[in-house]
Image (spheres, rainbow, N blue to C red):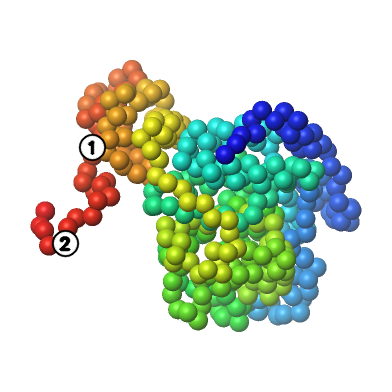
Amino acid sequence: MYSHRNNLELRNYVREITDSNRPVKKHFQKHSQKSKVMCSSLHQALMIFDIAKMNDVVEKHGSRSNLAKNHKRYIDYLSDTQGYLQQAMVPVNVFKLLDELAIDFPNFNEVIDYYREQIALAVFCAKGVFNAQPLLITGKAGVGKTAFCHRLAKIMDTFFSLISFSSMSAGFILGGMSSSWADGKPGKVVESLVTGHYANPIIVLDEIDKAGGDNRYDPLGCLYQLLEKETAAKFVDEGLETATDCSHINWVATANYMEKIPEPIVSRFAVIEVQPPKSEQMHNILKSIYANVKKDQVWGNRFKAQLEPEVVDKIIDSQISPRLIQRELIRACGRAVLRQSIFERESVAIEAKDFVIKNSFSEKKRPIGFVY
């Protein structure tokens, strides 16, 4: 465990490369004026989609062809990029932001250190492009895995895509369905690149241990190719049938039970287990969640800046998971308003009695055979 917060030399190096105005690739010089304006502001833009080949597919197949329709739709999405997508760059104050993230997610210290290492290597190679090896985060439900990934994407200022495996039953969700089918279309991986306009988005494979369905359409099948950079660089989505460069995607997977994931898939990830937050860590987590409630809700500024100590103690003693805290805090805010006139101008304070602890919050299993 370590921190880069005092490494001024490395932080100055980040500032130097991320503030530099890099020359635009020669490929852009032949594009339209609109494309030139857009591309001139990009750092390390890469050709992810071969627009020339995609246009050839449209011309070769008839207008009624589902394959041609898929390509035409994606060409329209990419019209101002010519197939070149920008890459998210490492922020100048990235290590400060990660230190702040560690305060809000104290049980994720090992995960945050993992990204510190990955970012240090990205900066060291003088490119400063956000790029990390695939990471599998395991742990009990509700410890904050998905919320952490959202915050990480916000820090890196890149596109975020969440693909839930709890309801996925077929591989074409990720890798596309053949255009020979009437409703055949590209999958969520290529779709994330097109809609996000970033070559290096964060794609979260949420609850990957819940992948199931017909063995003929393995939901994890295309990951064998996508999680290896060499093969991901020429990934062929079945809905497009042309290669797309998926080698710059930052993959994060979450799971409750690692043993339910095929070993060849697990071997493609670095694996870190996140434990539920300890009681002393919950103070910072509660502070962060309450601050987000106040910021995200239109009525948030009508409530006190901090939770009362008795409220904090009651929430911590209840052992409610971080996943449920925000929902129950919002309900507590509603109860607090009902206790007083809605038209009062003073800031509202949540009291301990406003936070109702239900038996459903308990993670203890009820004995079989007893009636409650």
Image check: 242 left or right of 103? right
- Identify the residue at horizontal 36%, vertical 35% (top origin): 279
Q: Tell me where residue 140 appears, x and y as whole percent.
A: 39, 52
Indicate which label's residue lies in the foreground, 2 or 1: 2
Image check: 148 left or right of 245? left
Q: Which of the pair 139/182 is nearer the observer?
A: 139
> What amino acid type is highlighted by mark number 2?
Ile
Q: Tell me where residue 178 appears, x and y as whole percent.
A: 60, 78
Q: Which mark is residue 368?
A: 2
Q: Tell me where residue 110 appears, x and y as whole percent.
A: 53, 44
Is residue 173 at all visible to an observer of this figure?
no
Mark 2 burial class by Cα count in 10 Å: few <14, some 14-19, many 20+: few
Residue occupied by mark 1 = 356
Q: Tell me where residue 308 appears, x and y as whole percent.
A: 32, 23
Image check: 220 left or right of 82? left
Alpha-carbon distance for marks 2 and 1?
26 Å
